[in-house]
Image (cartoon, helix red, strand yellow):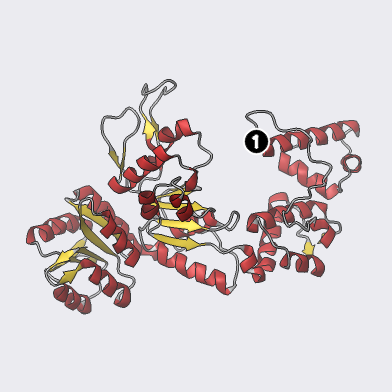
Amino acid sequence: MALHHALILDDEADIRELIEITLIPLGLRCHHAENLAQAYALLEQRRYSLCIADMKLPDGNGLDLVKHIQRHHPKLPVAVITAHGNIATAVEALKLGAFDFVAKPFEIEVLRKLVATALKMAERPKLDGRKKPLLIGRSETMNRVRQVIRKLARSQAPILISGESGTGKELAAQLIHANGPRADKPFVPVNCGAIPEHLMESEFFGHKKGSFTGATHDKPGLFQAADNGTLFLDEVVELPQHMQVKLLRAIQERAVRPIGMPKEIAVDVRILSATHTDLAQEVSRNTFREDLFYRLNVIELQMPSLRERPEDIPELATHILQRLSRDLDLPVPALSAKALNALRHYPFPGNIRELENILERSFTLCENDVINVDDLLLTSAGNGANRSDPTLPPTSPPAGTSLEDYLEQLEKQAILQALEATQHNKTAAAEKLGITFRALRYRLKKLGIA
């Protein structure tokens, strides 16, 4: 007995039959409609798990059905069938709330994957026990963001997540993935600005052994790693022009060609992307392709800055300090009233990431498990860093070494020298370094020094 019912809307009988033949082995009972009027009537008669609708119909357009379902049956995933190459229509359908689209002539395996993903939405309670990322904050602004994320999770539309650096764009992408039908499949994040340009094609699409110098073995790319799941493209604006072209094709064709392969490989990946810059402005400057922009920016999610939700700072601060305490096995320090007030009025140009850095630093500097204003080391410029700090190294890191790794090396070297000079007396070493015993204990744990 069928567990799910599917509504198939198409004015061509052979197309309806082909879709039904594809869906029956997946446990669906299919109900046919030749026009919008029949579809509306069927929707009132029973609950459906899936709807597949053609765009061109005798009495209207498939987009009319998408609008109707969004108003009257918002939990019903509807996939639209479009003419091959008519991406603009598909994008319009996704913006209106369509779950996904399939192009004619469609491949049976593509349709099966689409249906399987849609059916998982009816089984979401089974995944509710999974550990999900947390979006901290009870402000009205964050409540609206959470509501939007829940809606976006139900769709397969590409999402562009915009916002300043440090606002939690990757966390939002993780939540969209975790609340959607692909939650049990891979979430693959990639920083587009961190991949050397000459390696980008291999990293994204993979390569065959011997396809170029150094290709000593077959390597799957990021698209293959994210197959059936979600690929998150962070700082997508950093992609060079030639990769923008290849990415656009991969998204449109739902297939990739590894370097050295004679044919493409089909992939089923949901694309989420993020940027802290104005991508539309980059399009006007001709540094980002307009066609790729419209393909990625089907729906935009704007992440608010911390300045827009200062009422969330106490809860965020508590969460961060508790996490630091667990990680380092140290008592949770309290924030003094003055320190909390200072954080509330600080501009936070680096947003949540800057708040984390400030609290991590003050966690190590505070005395008697209380963080005071002076421990925060806030600057009037609001840049989250003490520019007059004499501990900053006067030289640049060596070539090939990141600033973060370089500073960590210098810090580790200074601590080891102090421990050696004091015969590993940690109290004396802390005094020699000019830091508290708590700060030394924190750094020893962080740097992995026994």
Residue 208 appears anywhere in the view: yes
Residue designated by label 1: 402
Residue farthest to the front?
A: 285
Q: Nearer the viewer, residue 85 or 5?
A: 85
> In which quadrant will I find the N terminus?
bottom left
Residue 310, position as x, y percentages in the image:
66, 69
Q: Residue at x 60, y 55 (%)?
A: 166
Q: Is residue 86 above or below residue 312?
A: above
Q: Is 394 left or right of 264, judged from the image as shown?
A: right
The answer to whether residue 372 is seen in the rendering is: no
Q: Secondary structure at mark 1?
A: loop
Q: Which image quadrant is residue 223 in?
A: top left
Residue 100, how many percent across, how many down? 30, 59
Asked if residue 3 is positioned above or below residue 215 in the image, the reply reads below
Q: Which class describes the residues within 10 Å of circle 1: few (<14), some (14-19), or many (20+)?
A: few
Q: Is residue 159 left or right of residue 76?
A: right
The image position of residue 77, as x and y in percent, is 30, 65
| Res 420 quadrant in image | top right
Is residue 131 placed above or below 263 in the rendered structure?
A: below
Residue at the image position 36 percent from the left and 58 percent from the top? 157
Measured along the vertical axis of the image, is residue 42 above or below residue 52? below
The residue lying at 44 percent from left, 21 percent from top is 214
Asked which quadrant contains residue 33, the reply is bottom left
Quadrant including the C terminus: top right
What is the number of callouts on the image? 1
Q: Residue furthest left?
A: 13
Name the residue located 38 percent from the left edge and 28 percent from the top edge.
218
| For residue 276, side relative to residue 412 (left or right) | left
Amino acid on which the number 1 mark rests in the picture: Ser
